[in-house]
Image (spheres, rainbow, N blue to C red):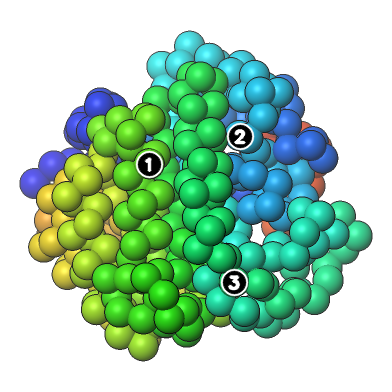
Amino acid sequence: MPALFDPVVLGAIHAPNRILMAPLTRGRADRDAVPTPIMAEYYTQRAGAGLIISEATGISREGLGWPYAPGLWSDEQAAAWKPVTDAVHAAGGRIVAQLWHMGRQVHSSVTGSQPVSSSATRSDGTVHTYDGKQAFETARPLDVAEFPRLLDDYERATRNAMAAGFDGVQVHAANGYLIDEFLRDNANFRDDRYGGSPENRVRLLREVTERVASIAGADRTAVRLSPNGNSQGVDDSDPASVFGPAAKALSEIGIAFLELRELGPDGTYGATDVPKQSPLIRQLFDGPLVLNSDFTSRAQAQAVLDAGAADAIAFGRTFLANPDLPERLRIDAPLNPIDPKTLYSQGPEGYIDYPALETEAA
């Protein structure tokens, strides 16, 4: 079985190790969703990852409601991403852009319009806005006539990502956002060709992935799913029935890799007793499979590779506080703790000032 530090081929991307940096929202862009110079330093510090998956990046203002998150729908945004990708490449790294439509998980005070989703539903709790936390709003169902426009938004963002120098893109179809709201039956109550049967609920995922792959190339297109348990209020009564067909569809498209965020019963940011779907998906998806959720040690990650359950491991919060995580894992060095107060703040604190090993030694 491969070691965590062995190279892996992810479509057209040749990763030097199997330690991927998972997408991590950090809120360091400006209010127009334009990346800022500090972001280049942040990602360059983490260029030792086999592959960096960027923070979730909006395909449109409609779909981006997180304060100070970046976008890829404008020329200005794409131009501001270019120094980031250039810096990562100069440091020997690889980076793909995760494309995001948040669906009902936004607020009109940020996007300027009512949230959209598969159906007229509303998330529980509150949402981050520029004016503090506010109650979620009821989403309006996307009309079938709007789907061409939505696919065009994904295409434009993909073109901008490739123009900005990203090595590929990842379609964010997880975590209770728009595509996930179509996939799972407690959020999708449609009676048209995008609702009802599992095959219909997979349709949007397939159409988006096909459009993105037509621009970036299937071998530079990835997808993220969260197939088990509740994620921001989105869940399914029979996950195998929908994520099995989803895995088959993505395999037929020939994407570069599939990443799964799978909750466990003792998860730190969400937990569930719903069985993990990765064993089923492993059988149905022919490409490289990446697992993600609560990985914090070399032994833990290597055990998954040894079992043949995945081809690579995506580390999230562990990478946030440890810019040199691959080296720390290689020598079993102690890990920096995370400062929760600075997760989404706009300054350098808790962003680019976590020490690397050589800094600590000095």
Q: Which residue is mark 3?
A: 141
Q: Is residue 356 above or below residue 294?
A: above
Look at label 2 and name its amino acid: Leu
Secondary structure beneath label 3 = strand
The quarter of the picture where residue 332 lies is: top left
Furthest toward the top, the residue is 90
Q: Which is nearer the N-term, disc 2 or disc 1?
A: 2
| Residue 211 numbered tag | 1
Question: In this image, 41 relative to 244: left or right?
Answer: right
- Residue sitting nearer the eye, 4 or 147: 147
Question: In this image, 256 relative to 166: left or right?
Answer: left
Secondary structure beneath label 1 = helix
Look at label 3 and name its amino acid: Pro
- Residue sitting nearer the eye, 335 or 60: 60
Percent across and percent down for residue 51 are 38, 33
The C terminus, quarter of image: top right
Q: How much space separates mark 3 and mark 1, taking CA atoms?
A: 22 Å
Q: Which is nearer the N-term, disc 3 or disc 2?
A: 2
Q: Which is nearer the N-term, disc 3 or disc 1?
A: 3
Look at label 1 and name its amino acid: Arg
Q: How much space separates mark 3 and mark 2, taking CA atoms?
A: 24 Å
Q: Which residue is mark 2?
A: 72
Q: Is residue 76 above or below residue 114?
A: above
> Residue drawn at (18%, 51%), measured in percent from left and top?
251
User: How many residues crowd mark 1 within 10 Å: few (<14), some (14–19), many (20+)?
Assistant: some
Furthest toward the right, the residue is 131
